[in-house]
Image (cartoon, rainbow, N blue to C red):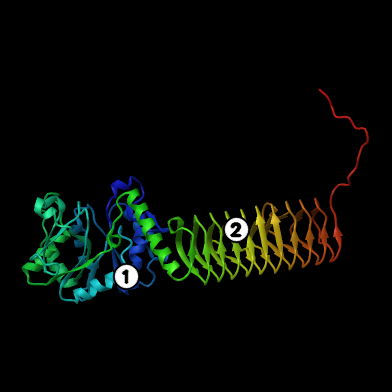
Amino acid sequence: MAAGKGTRMKSKLPKVLHRLAGRALVHHVLDMAVALGARSAVLITGHGADAVEAACGPATGVAAGLAMNLVRQEPQLGTGHAVQQTVPVLPDDGLVLVLSGDVPLTQVQTLRALVDLCAGDSLALLTVDLPDPSGYGRVLRMGDSAEAPVQCIVEHKDASPAQRAVREIYSGIMAVPAPLLKTWLARLDNHNAQKEYYLTDIVKFAVADGVPVRAHKITDAVQVAGVNSPLQLAELERAFQLRLATTLMEQGVRIADPARFDVRGSLACGQDVAIDVNCIFEGLVSLGDDVSIGANCVIANATIANGAVIHPFTHIDGEKAGVTVGEGALVGPFARLRPGAVLGPQVHIGNFVEVKNSTLARGAKANHLAYLGDATVGERVNYGAGSITANYDGALKHRTVIGADVHVGSNCVLVAPVTIGAGGTVGGGSTITRDTPPGALSVARGRQIAIAGWKRPKK
């Protein structure tokens, strides 16, 4: 169900498209369907339908391999009315799992247990006890036992004071055989305080028809927490990140402070990885054994090999091309690696150095205030402070090739396309526009002169 307005978000963006861990809320829910092996999904849209449907369409790659049906709820007349819109596309031989597009942290094993409890012949509800159940539908049982069958669900606005004292709530998630669901949806009415069609009314229909109503009660309320405001979104973000940090630390990763750690994609870690505070990992990131990530780094779509050290305040963004950092390399602080940067073993990239679409071979160094774009850099090259490759002529990009064991002095401009021969030296302050021979000293700058007794102009 992804049709709600989400007015408390106070945003033009449909609620289910707000992001948690870098992905839309509804994408997390679709991930659950994929992980469960569902043969199809029905997305119920309403408010912002065009945007929600576009965000979940085949071209996005979301829920790959899952057949997607799109239905619209217009106007929005309650949860029962929302699910009624799915009837034409629900196969009669299926089991329906009803999920909410703004409840992103339910665990797949929890949903599997719910499906198993349904067993194809009953109505299974996911429930939890809350210290403050205000606003939720209360689960009323046929007796005082926690194992007693469910009798009905009463929405908060329709509940009596005694019923509101019940702490067990219905999460909004249920599993039900499709033929039974279709029969019960046809019997819904809106005779209630909100004049809406409640999906929860099917519980009393099941009881009346003699169909068992079973509840799978969990203790982790975060799994059924929804997002209705920016505050709740932030709370679930921290819950998600803490859960992931805990998993990584149980695998041996040393995270300095789990409360200051964010993954917005996928992070794979080898043995003895250390991550300092305020680091953000986006897209696909892989950290090898003994990798150290300093404080305040942002790393996206990168593979970092064993023993590499990423010093604080480094920004690595591989986008589609990716970034590779070789074994034992040192990067930062305050360095920037852009798409296509490939650093070999023992490469050093220092403060305020930017590397883009360039390959640096073993032991190459660019330690200060430099730019390497569209370059091929040989082994053991020393690239001086303030030097740049001028790779763009205003229309096209060109490549710079720097041979092994070259020393480039400070404040040099290498105007591509150009090749610096192996073992050569480029004198500081040079602008190199032509290929240089191997082993040569190349200097391209105005000759220094001194004028004795020169007087400065005066006003």
Q: Which residue is mark 1?
A: 108
Please state the horizontal and vertical placement of residue 308, each as a whole percent of the image. Answer: 60, 66
Q: Position of residue 456 (x, y in %)?
A: 85, 29
> Closer to the N terminus: mark 1 or mark 2?
1
Tell me the quarter of the image containing the C terminus: top right
Q: Is residue 174 left or right of residue 404?
A: left
Quarter assignment of residue 171: bottom left
Q: Is residue 85 visible?
A: no
In the displayed structure, 38 sits above or below 85; it is below
Label 2 amino acid?
His
In the displayed structure, does residue 399 sit left or right of residue 447? left
Q: Is residue 9 above or below residue 373?
A: above
Identify residue type, mark 1.
Val
State the image coordinates of residue 222 (x, y, percent, origin top left): 30, 60
* Crowdedness near tag 2: few (<14), some (14–19) or many (≥20) residues, C-alpha within 10 Å: many
The residue at which mark 2 appears reads as 311
Element carrying mark 1: helix
Q: How crowded is the residue under tag 1: few (<14 C-alpha within 10 Å), some, or many (20+)?
A: some
Residue placed furthest toward the top: 459
User: What quarter of the picture does the N terminus occupy?
Assistant: bottom left
Residue placed at 15% from the left, 58% from the top?
Answer: 138
Quadrant of the image occupied by residue 250: bottom left
